[in-house]
Image (cartoon, grey):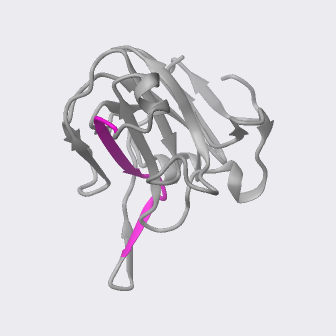
Amino acid sequence: MLGVKNSVSLNDTTPTGSLTTLFGKAQTLELSYNPSTTVSTKTVSIGAAAGSTPSSPAFIAISNNANPNASGAQIYFEGTVASGQKLYADASINSLTNTANTGSAAFMSTVSGQGIFADIYASQAAFKAGAAPVEVDTYNTSGSITTSGITSSQAMYFNDRVGSLTVIGYVGSTGGHLVS
């Protein structure tokens, strides 16, 4: 355990249940990057990948908005990664000001059907130039989705793969599990 207060295990036995049920609403996702357009999730329709397989290394911007440059978009991660590298999408920190987020902003969306958007570019230069992303991955972090007024479980699990990103760690409002 990293600490009794936060109830986050490190390199322990990986839990197998729904992440939001086990650990509460998502604050930090530990992800691994391996270029792909494959979607393999335990819960059907929780994620989607569009575009083509990106390169390695690639530049990734993960946010709460399909347009990470939009006004009010919250950036969870921005940087260059290579195949096999781990990264953290973190809602608890404002990456632009390096200050802690508070209240609902400190967690990924809990709105039914909402989640994160990972825009993957060939390079940081392509991102800065306003080029279209090579791949866009979307992943529902809310734990539930509403269709036609009916809310149903859209549980997140470890090893959910959406395109080039695989969930390998999770920290929520009540605890979590990280690989490293």
Residue 122 showing in the rendered view: yes
| Residue at figure coordinates x 26%, y 24% from the top left | 35
Tell me if residue 75 is in the magenta stretch. Answer: no
Q: Extreme bottom residue here?
A: 149
| Residue at figure coordinates x 45%, y 23% from the top left | 125
Q: In the visual, does 74 lie left or right of 22? A: right
Q: Is residue 88 above or below residue 64?
A: above
Q: Quadrant of the N terminus?
A: top right
Q: Extreme front residue here?
A: 129
Q: Is most of the magenta stretch helix, strand or loop?
A: strand
Q: In the visual, does 143 lie left or right of 172? A: left
**Residue 22 picture location, percent across and down:** 52, 47
Nearer-the-camera pick, 168 or 55: 55
| Residue at figure coordinates x 51%, y 17% from the top left | 11
Nearer-the-camera pick, 68 or 12: 68
Tell me if residue 134 is in the magenta stretch. Answer: yes
Q: Quadrant of the C terminus?
A: top right
Residue 13 showing in the rendered view: no
| Residue at figure coordinates x 43%, y 18% from the top left | 81
Q: How many marks?
A: 0
Q: In the visual, does 93 lie left or right of 47? A: right
**Residue 89 picture location, percent across and down:** 54, 35
**Residue 26 picture location, percent across and down:** 57, 47
Q: In the visual, does 17 lie left or right of 10? A: left
Q: Is residue 26 above or below residue 177?
A: below
Q: Is residue 172 above or below residue 141?
A: above
For the record, the magenta segment spans 133-146
**Residue 42 picture location, percent across and down:** 26, 47
